Image: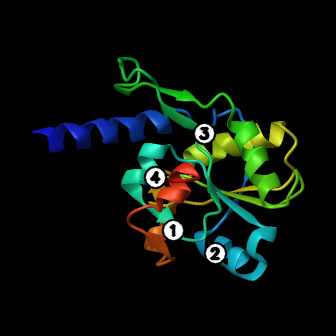
Amino acid sequence: MKKTASRFGFASLLLACSALAAPAHAAPVATISPQLAALAKAEHGRAVLLLDVRSHAEAVFGGQATPADALVPFAEAAQPLRWDSASGSVAVVRVPDFVEWARAWVAFYGGDEDTPLLLLCRTGAVAAAAAEVLHQAGFTHVTVIQGGLDGAGSEDGPQYAGWKAAGLPWLAQADPVFLFGETD
């Protein structure tokens, strides 16, 4: 029973995070295929940064793209956990210091607002919203990885296979240092 409840809770969190996707009126963001993103990382190393913008829960349960440089959640489950009747899922809130965390990770790797950033989420939708926020904060080269880690698409829209389906390197269990920056 506990395992089932846990799965439903996580599924609800994923749905709720998707609700934070960029609004329809937002400016289009640049996108790149997972294959080209992996090639950019392989060729340019940390001159191009791959930021995973999923929540901690998504990263814990969904794994990690191996070349990701940092986990910088755009949204997390609201605390205390509660149900959002309007969305039909766990309530999520945007991380208020998302831009500051992104800026700190970029600086940690020696970059600045002109450093090319590749954003990855579960499907690409949350990364698009995060890209818009980073662009408004002054980052000049922000690109969303199409399909995210798991793939995305709709009946009437484009289908994207995502990082995993493209056969690109990933870990089923995210590295604790990647998740939390340090361990005990």
Number of the front mark, 3 or 1: 3
**What label sits on residue 163 in the rendered view?**
1
- Percent across and percent down for residue 59 are 46, 52
**Residue 1 visible within the image:** yes
Q: Is residue 12 above or below residue 141?
A: above
Q: Is residue 14 above or below residue 143?
A: above
Do the residues under discs 1 and 2 have CB atoms within 8 angstroms? yes
Amino acid type, callout 3: Phe
Please report whichever mark, 4 or 1, sits nearer to the chain's N-terminal start: 4
SS of the residue under disc 3:
loop
Amino acid type, callout 1: Trp
SS of the residue under disc 1:
helix
Amino acid type, callout 2: Ala
Q: Which residue position holds label 4?
A: 59
* Residue projecting furthest to the top: 85
What is the spatial separation of the Cα atoms under label 1 and label 2, in whole angstroms?
A: 9 Å
SS of the residue under disc 4:
helix
- Front-most of residues 52 and 153: 52
**What label sits on residue 38 in the rendered view?**
2
- Front-most of residues 79 and 182: 182
Number of the front mark, 4 or 2: 4
- Front-most of residues 115 and 89: 115
Residue 1 in which image quadrant = top left
What is the spatial separation of the Cα atoms under label 2 and label 3, in whole angstroms?
A: 22 Å
Please report whichever mark, 3 or 1, sits nearer to the chain's N-terminal start: 3
Q: How many numbered badges does the structure rendering display?
A: 4
- Percent across and percent down for residue 65 are 52, 66
Residue at position x 63%, y 75% from top?
38
Please report whichever mark, 2 or 3, sits nearer to the chain's N-terminal start: 2
Q: Residues within 10 Å of mark 1 (few under 14, many from 20)?
A: many
Q: Which residue position holds label 3?
A: 74
Please report whichever mark, 3 or 4, sits nearer to the chain's N-terminal start: 4
